Image (cartoon, rainbow, N blue to C red):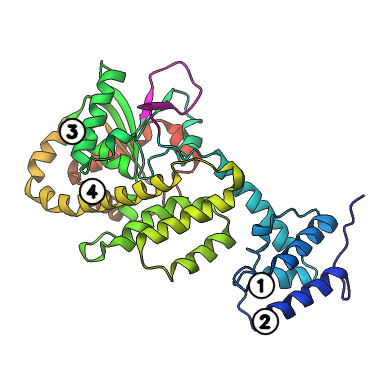
Amino acid sequence: MRANREIQTGSHEDRLLNQLWEALGVDPKTTPNHITLGELGMESMFAVELQQGLERDYDIKLSLSDIKTITVKQVKEFQSGNKEEIINLSKEIKLMRAQLTKIKFIIPTETHTKLNAVQNGNPIYFLPPVEGIFAALESMAKKINRPVIGLNWTEDLKDMTTIKEISKYYINLLKKLSPNGNYDIVGHSLGALIARKMLIKAPVGRAVIIDILSDSDLREDNINDEYFFESVNKFFYQILPKNLKERVARDMNGIKDTNEKLKKISSELKEFGGKSLVDKDLDNILKNTFERGKLIANYRIKSVKKFNQFKQEIKTKFIKSNGKLFIITPFEDSDNNSIVSRIVESYYLPEKVFKEILQLKNLFYPQFFSIGFRGKT
């Protein structure tokens, strides 16, 4: 039977950790709690001993690289007899690594991909999000009782630099996949802007926008590479454990060049994912996500002026599609007028028409609302 004892003063682990503080040349009482052992320069010898002790006596399994993400606070808690911090870290790392290894960081060659196993019913088409892969939407797709097909971002689109070009590509693709028209589409981030464009230009049956853009602070004076880089972080940071995420964020503060930051994220993901994360396109996907983030921001900035100039024309087109657009807001807002105003501005929708559409949103696919897209995510 595996031992399950508390650390006592004078125990092997207690002595080891005291030696660790001494070897690192730090006083744990004055060292910031958030600093990791790796940041303090922990040597492999101590990492191996700590790794073996955790697994032998407490069934806590961590790789050597994981050991170096343990924080000063977690070590102090462990040394005082509280194992929960490191146990929880181990569980989080296991969960995040399992999620990460399920994501295929491969730029597809096929124009579309099935996202669930449902065979019967009219398909729903998911437009590509800013990261160009459907990992963040797959769990939702699997809960829908109709076939869900992801419209891929392939190499054919790499030279397209406008929402107009991209929308035209997907309109033509859907002419082949659904030649009778009247198809349903779902858009998130970049896909939301494509969906909005297609609603005017294509024979869309119904369109769903999973709104995140209206909650972003987009002004012409804050549009820079740092802002665009955050579009990469928002997705890829979700698949790193908290300790590693915070340490990477601190490392990023010392890196000014955007390409170097992208390389840093790629390196961290590969190291964390291990040998199972071998997908060859990770670097390109990161770079493409960054470029598409710029595309979204620049499109929105330029479209503000255009929207003001052609508001009546756009309003007329949207009136013809009344009842076809549904907005899902994945965050809470107690002020309905405020959220309506922000969404109108983000997607360039005529306010009168949008208010009518907002009242109809619950008629569309109730299962969307049952899996976390009503409150905070």
Tell which tag, 4 or 3, sits nearer the viewer: 3
Label 3 element class: helix
Please tell me whether residue 336 is drawn above or below residue 5 in the rendered image: above
- Label 1 or label 4, whichever comes before in sequence order: 1
Amino acid of disc 4: Val
Tell which tag, 1 or 4, sits nearer the viewer: 1
Q: For the residues marked 4 and 2, what is the alpha-carbon distance in whole angstroms?
A: 54 Å
Amino acid of disc 1: Val
Q: Which mark is residue 200?
A: 3
Q: Identify the residue at horizontal 11%, vertical 36% (top origin).
A: 316
The answer to whether any part of residue 336 appears in the image is no
Left or right of 233? Residue 169 is left
Q: For the residues marked 2 and 1, what is the alpha-carbon distance in whole angstroms?
A: 10 Å
Residue 194 sits in which quadrant? top left
Q: For the residues marked 2 and 3, what is the alpha-carbon distance in whole angstroms?
A: 63 Å
Q: For the residues marked 4 and 3, what is the alpha-carbon distance in whole angstroms?
A: 16 Å
What's drawn in magenta, residue-wise? 108-125
The residue labelled by disc 2 is: 26
